[in-house]
């Protein structure tokens, strides 16, 4: 490997893509194409970067398996940065195996982190835990350690573990400082900023205020009876009940929690839960049926007592009741609430859960996507929808190959 390639590689590893391009911009040999691709990715021109890396992989040829595997890893990172989550995971796994077979442990770990970050984006937290458990971080360079800690912070934020997230971000900041890469340090700062942004709106009696993730964590660890409109669950210190697939029941639970310790009239419950403008006896019968179903779902957490004018919530163990909602509720808040758990949903599954037509749900998803509030991956029947990823995912494209002489 000649001196210009070596110098360009070191420039990219330190986060200096322009310095790298100054050395290799006019070269078309395979190593130069690969480094130009990574440089363009760091500069934000992801389509051009992808084209260059594919050209580099072809130029290396079938006998240079290690170099081709590194190009695959770089292309996978570009796909992740541009949120092309349908990018073939098997291709990346094959590249990781090749890297391991050739003794390139650092880049094999880098490839595995790309797999982990993709799984984290689509909400498969158990699989993420399994993969991370098998990683030995001892030999990692500072940049990869920063990525590791950002992933740990992302997991903690999804699981409403604010203190663990802050600790992981402190470690990520320390690793980013040692790496000396400004873009990586900026990513840690962005994640910290998001952690200090209101995560929900708390409604408890006459009090209503925005709360940070730390306060949500404290609330969920308390003995309070919580109706969580961000995730469509009802919980107390003993049990968690998901109403994600029972939207009518959740509307009833939410209204009862918001009115606690008072009651809610039958007319108000019918109008809100069934969207009825003219109320007749059939609606009253349906309300009794749905209240009965809600009693059954919450029997270990609370009673629902009939009053003269309607119904009232009576927690079995908790002394207080709180309602958590999204910081800003909007027209399509119900769709966002289902997607807030980090799982990926098909439009048909959302329609079933919401009790709406698939066409209505698809229109809502298209509107939210245009506003940047949801995103999709896959095509046709395999298409899935999710909220944009929480901060904590390293998207800074680094050199996916050891430097010459390392």
Image: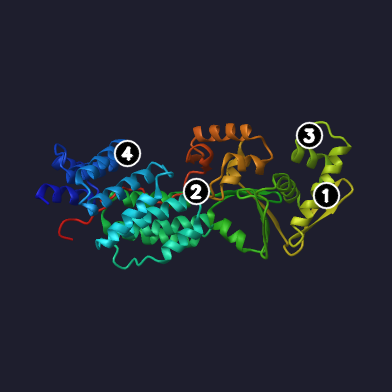
Estimate the x, y position of residue 247 in percent, counting from the top left: 69, 45
**Of marks 1 and 4, which one's residue comes earlier in the chain?**
4
Between marks 4 and 2, how big is the CA–CA gap? 29 Å
Question: In the image, what residue occupies the spot 37% across and 62% down?
Answer: 171
Task: Tell me whether the residue at label 1 lies in contact with that at label 4, contact meaning CB atoms closer than 8 angstroms.
Answer: no
Q: Nearer the viewer, mark 3 or mark 4?
A: 4
**Which residue is rendered at x = 84% and y = 34% of the image?**
279
Frontmost of labels 3 and 2 is 3
User: Label 4 crowding class (10 Å Cα cut-off): few <14, some 14-19, many 20+?
Assistant: many
Q: Which mark is residue 55?
A: none
Report, in whole angstroms, how far the alpha carbon at label 1 lies from the one at label 3.
18 Å
The residue tagged 2 is 197
Give coordinates of residue 398: x percent, y percent: 28, 50
**Comparing labels 4 and 2, the label whose residue is closer to the camera:** 4
In the image, 347: left or right of 12? right
Q: Is residue 303 left or right of residue 186?
A: right
Quarter containing the C terminus = bottom left
Residue occupied by mark 1 = 311
Of the numbered discs 2 and 1, the one sitting upstream in the chain is: 2
- Residue 150 shows up from this direction: yes
**Quarter where residue 105 is shown:** bottom left
Q: Label 1, label 4: how many angstroms apart (C-alpha)? A: 56 Å
- The residue to which callout 3 is attached is 276
**Are dots 3 and 2 in contact, CB under 8 Å?**
no
Taking 377 as reference, is 161 above or below it? below
Do tag 2 and tag 1 residues touch (Cβ < 8 Å)? no
Residue under the image location 75 percent in, 35 percent down: 275
Disc 3 element:
loop
Q: Which residue is mark 4?
A: 46
Q: Earlier in the sequence, mark 4 or mark 2?
A: 4
> Can you say whether 48 is above or below 394 in the image?
above
């Amino acid at each position: 490997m000649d001196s210009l390639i070596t110098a360009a590689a070191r420039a990219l590893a330190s986060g200096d893509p322009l310095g790298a391009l100054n050395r290799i911009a006019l070269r078309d040999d395979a190593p130069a194409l690969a480094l130009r691709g990574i440089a363009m990715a760091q500069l934000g021109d992801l389509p051009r970067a992808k084209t260059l890396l594919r050209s580099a992989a072809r130029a290396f040829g079938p006998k240079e398996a290690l170099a081709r595997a590194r190009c695959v890893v770089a292309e996978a990172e570009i796909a992740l940065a541009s949120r092309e989550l349908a990018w073939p995971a098997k291709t990346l796994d094959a590249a990781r195996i090749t890297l391991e077979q050739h003794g390139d442990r650092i880049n094999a770990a880098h490839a595995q982190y790309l797999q982990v970050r993709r799984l984290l984006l689509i909400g498969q937290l158990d699989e993420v835990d399994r993969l991370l458990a098998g990683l030995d971080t001892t030999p990692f360079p500072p940049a990869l350690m920063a990525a590791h800690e950002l992933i740990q912070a992302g997991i903690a934020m999804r699981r409403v573990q604010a203190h663990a997230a802050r600790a992981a971000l402190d470690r990520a900041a320390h690793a980013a400082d040692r790496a000396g890469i400004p873009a990586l340090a900026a990513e840690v700062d962005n994640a910290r900023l998001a952690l200090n942004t209101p995560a929900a709106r708390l409604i408890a009696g006459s009090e209503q205020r925005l709360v940070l993730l730390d306060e949500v964590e404290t609330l969920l660890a308390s003995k309070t009876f919580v109706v969580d409109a961000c995730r469509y669950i009802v919980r107390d210190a003993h049990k968690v009940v998901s109403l994600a697939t029972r939207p009518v029941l959740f509307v009833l639970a939410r209204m009862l929690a918001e009115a606690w310790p008072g009651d809610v009239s039958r007319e108000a419950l019918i109008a809100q839960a069934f969207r009825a403008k003219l109320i007749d006896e059939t609606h009253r019968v349906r309300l009794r049926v749905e209240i009965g179903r809600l009693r059954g779902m919450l029997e270990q957490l609370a009673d629902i007592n009939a009053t003269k004018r309607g119904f009232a919530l009576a927690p079995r163990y908790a002394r207080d009741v709180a309602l958590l909602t999204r910081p800003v509720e909007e027209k399509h808040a119900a769709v966002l609430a289902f997607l807030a758990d980090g799982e990926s949903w098909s439009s048909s599954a959302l329609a079933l859960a919401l009790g709406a037509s698939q066409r209505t749900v698809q229109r809502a998803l298209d509107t939210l996507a245009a506003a940047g509030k949801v995103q999709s991956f896959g095509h046709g029947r395999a298409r899935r929808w999710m909220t944009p990823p929480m901060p904590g995912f390293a998207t800074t494209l680094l050199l996916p190959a050891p430097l010459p002489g390392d």
